[in-house]
């Protein structure tokens, strides 16, 4: 049996996440164990998770995951690179993961691996230092370096899930981990949009007083409604005040 790692937030768990698990199993033959490393009660950008970590872990377990491990808060709050490195570190230390599966706009692991290795090169690092010295942000400096080295193929860095996937691959290379990266094409709405399988859109719906029944697996809907009835969610900074 193969063991697959997924680094996630599941804020909240929706049909796109369930589809990612399902397609990962299909690609690798079905008989696999899914281990998720998930951020806890605080997520990237320092936001409060819409439901507490135990509820979100329960959503994942009831919807196809086999084990959920917490990504400690200090690492969940880091930028994409730190978030990715911490997740890969945990999966690598488990010593059982054969693959790391992630969603991406590209769906092309070869292209993402090429981009990761290009941006790790000495040439890329020289370009990045040059642009940082001119006052650009790290993300903009990295994009400039990618443009210089990869040309049109550097467009892969302009999509957020591609960029996170590249960070996962970089972390696997840096740790010399015996984990193979794999990706499935992301479906649904754009990252942080209000349409499709967008966690951002689902959070807005939940905070508005409705449960997005058509966009979440039945088990995730049931857990959400239980949390709401018990007065434990949905959570927001405004409500916490």
Image (cartoon, rainbow, N blue to C red):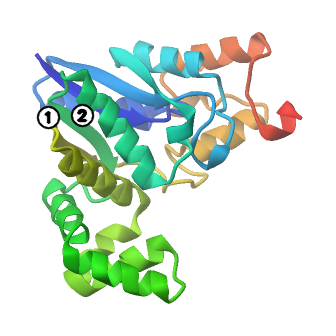
- Label for residue 23? 2
Residue at 36% from the left image edge and 60% from the top image edge: 163
- Disc 2 on helix, strand or loop? helix
- Disc 1 on helix, strand or loop? helix
Q: Are marks 2 and 1 in contact (CB under 8 Å)?
A: yes
Given residues 63 and 210, the one toward you in this image is 63
- Which quadrant of the structure image shows residue 63? top left
Q: In the displayed structure, would residue 79 be above or below residue 66? A: below
Across and down, in percent, residue 88 comes to 31, 38
User: Is 177 situated left or right of 192 in this image?
Assistant: left
Q: CA distance from mark 2 to mark 1?
A: 6 Å
Residue at 40% from the left image edge and 28% from the top image edge: 37
Residue at 58% from the left image edge and 17% from the top image edge: 55
Residue 74 showing in the rendered view: yes
User: Is 48 situated left or right of 84 in this image?
Assistant: right
Across and down, in percent, residue 120 comes to 23, 66
């Amino acid at each position: 049996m193969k063991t697959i790692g997924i680094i996630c937030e599941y804020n909240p768990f929706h049909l796109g996440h369930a589809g990612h698990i399902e397609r990962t199993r299909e690609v690798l033959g079905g008989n696999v164990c899914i281990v998720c490393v998930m951020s806890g009660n605080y997520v990237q950008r320092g936001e409060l998770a819409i439901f507490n970590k135990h509820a979100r872990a329960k959503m994942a377990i009831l919807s196809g995951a086999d084990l959920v491990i917490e990504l400690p808060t200090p690492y969940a709050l880091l930028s994409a690179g730190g978030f990715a490195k911490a997740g890969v570190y945990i999966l690598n230390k488990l010593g059982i993961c054969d693959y790391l599966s992630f969603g991406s706009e590209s769906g092309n692991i070869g292209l993402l691996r090429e981009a990761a290795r290009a941006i790790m090169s000495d040439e890329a690092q020289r370009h990045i230092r040059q642009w940082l010295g001119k006052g650009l942000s790290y993300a903009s400096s990295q994009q400039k370096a990618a443009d210089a080295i990869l040309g049109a193929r550097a467009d892969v860095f302009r999509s957020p899930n591609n960029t996170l996937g590249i960070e996962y691959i970089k972390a696997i290379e840096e740790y010399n981990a015996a984990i193979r990266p794999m990706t499935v094409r992301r479906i649904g709405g754009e990252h942080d949009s209000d349409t499709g399988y967008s966690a951002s859109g689902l959070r807005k719906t939940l905070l508005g007083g409705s449960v997005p029944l058509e966009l979440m697996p039945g088990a995730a809907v049931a857990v959400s409604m239980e949390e709401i009835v018990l007065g434990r969610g949905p959570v927001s900074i405004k409500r916490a005040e």
